[in-house]
Amino acid sequence: MLNNTTGEYLFIRGCIIFLRSIAPLSISYITLLSLGLLRAYRLPLFIEIITALETVWYACFWIYRKSYLQRPAVHPRLYSEETRRKLVTRCIGLIPDYEAYISKWFLGADPTDVKRENMKEFFRWAFFNTAVPNPSHDEELADYIRQLERAIGRKIEPGRSDVKCLRLTLDNVVILHRSLVWYFCVSFVDNLTYFWLLFQGFQFYRMSLYYTFSVFPPRLQTLVGTSPSPAPDLSYWFRPHTSKSKLPILFLHGIGIGLYPYCHFLAELKQKGIDGDVGIIAVEIMPISFRITSEATEKDTLCKKILAVLDHHGFDEFVLVSHSYGSIITTHLLRDPYVSTRISSMVIIDPISILLHHPDVAYNMMIRQPQTAQEWQLWYFASKDAGVAHTLARRFFWFENILWREDIADRRATVFLSERDLLVNTPEVRNYLLEDSRKEDVDGTRRLSVVWCKGLDHGQVFETKKWRGRLLDEVRKISSKRVVS
């Protein structure tokens, strides 16, 4: 993640302008060339081939894919009315500023402009997965609005006003074109990561050859890899576990260019112990890794695939380490009856799943207009990436993904929060977690710890040696079979 300096701002804006200009310039050049208007101004043959490929790529693939990704989300089954009512009560009780909450969910509108019918529209999406009014839900919706009014301390006026709410899984998927030049860069970084992790002693477990061609840009390692994954469409990196005093680790990465940002962390984490090595499984999550691939896997299916990987390597008990979007998968694993019993302890870095009913993550990721270098980096390279945007808009159901404090209360857990996180309202998350952090085991050790990363932004804990060392120390401590307080 960049810092908010003038130089880095100019750098990221320049990169974005360059990448976004490739397609229009290529199409313009090929069009003029085909009309015979550039006979005296021809570019070198190599450049002409690139412009031709970029033009074909845009015309024959991108336009279709942009339309394809707009297909409606397949929502999960509705919760029962009893469960919905409990969820609404819990969510409303965990809102620190009701007016700000309403304003941000309604894209910055004045809260007093949000009328009763507008709130019903929001609640239909949030708790009923639909935009279509259903008379059978009217009484329940009226109860929710009355409950919100009591919390706010004012009446919500009847009627409808001209304001719109953010409805992540119903709104259009907003994406920006990616050139072949960009995917060449992704491929370069992918191969760099591959050789780095091989050099560090990790073993790559590839997708089956059938699924190999479902990922673009093509991955050399899936063709030359000799170890097939027990889950045919899930690739990962593995280091055998031989330590007698520590538990193995399952690592789940966040949105970005795969495992590349975590290479130093994984390399330092694998340092040999006095009684053997700590085993590591680092899962690759392709739909959020700037690739063109199949859509994100449904949560229960993904849990089964990860369970197959754990079984294959004998990880009967392990430490779960996750970052950012990986905290969403953490939620699913904690609620899976087969995987959850194997999770001994957890380290969660920059979680987006805690207090997910707040609008901050959805608004900052999908709606906010970028101003700083970091926001521009997030906006173009993550938010508007086709795979990321589709995952968040069509495969991301907040009520399934939200992580409550009690979900992690029955095991040791450490949460790293960045003070300047551009996605998450970390002060609120810290306050929520620390309300319960005084609970201790019978042996006096504290179950839930919060590490406040002063001065850091989202993901920067992996970028500095000082903070990465602090993170490594915590992971090593919490992976000990007898945790030292």
Image: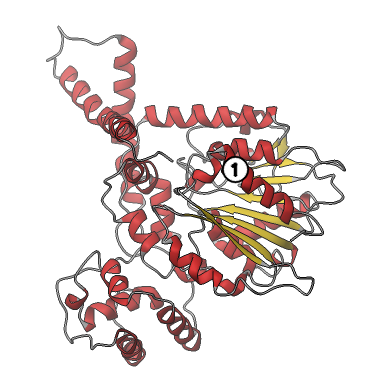
Q: Is residue 266 left or right of residue 387?
A: right
Q: Specify whether residue 237 is in view.
A: yes
Residue appearing at x 37%, y 45% in the figure? 378
Q: Is residue 158 above or below residue 54?
A: below
Q: Position of residue 291 (x, y in %)?
A: 46, 40
Q: Position of residue 83 (x, y in %)?
A: 50, 84
**Label 1, residues with CA under 10 Å away: few <14, some 14-19, many ≥20:** some
Q: Is residue 78 left or right of residue 13?
A: right
Observer-nearest of 305 and 463: 463
Q: Is residue 185 above or below residue 325?
A: above
Q: Amino acid at mark 1?
A: Arg
Observer-nearest of 182 and 94: 94
Residue appearing at x 72%, y 39% in the figure? 270
Q: Specify whether residue 72 is in view.
A: no
Q: Is residue 325 left or right of residue 338?
A: left
Observer-nearest of 425 and 210: 425
Q: Position of residue 18 (x, y in %)?
A: 28, 28
Quadrant of residue 95 in the image? bottom left
Q: How many marks?
A: 1
Q: Going by the picture, which residue comes out furthest to the top? A: 40
Q: Is residue 140 left or right of residue 327?
A: left
Color scheme of the displayed model: secondary structure
Q: Going by the picture, which residue comes out furthest to the left? A: 37
Which residue is tagged 1? 468
Quadrant (top left/top right/bottom left/bottom right) for the N terminus: top left
Q: Position of residue 145 (x, y in %)?
A: 31, 86
Q: Is residue 174 above or below residue 143?
A: above
Q: Is residue 283 above or below residue 395?
A: above
Residue appearing at x 65%, y 32% in the figure? 197
Secondary structure of the residue carrying tag 1 is helix
Quadrant (top left/top right/bottom left/bottom right) for the C terminus: bottom right
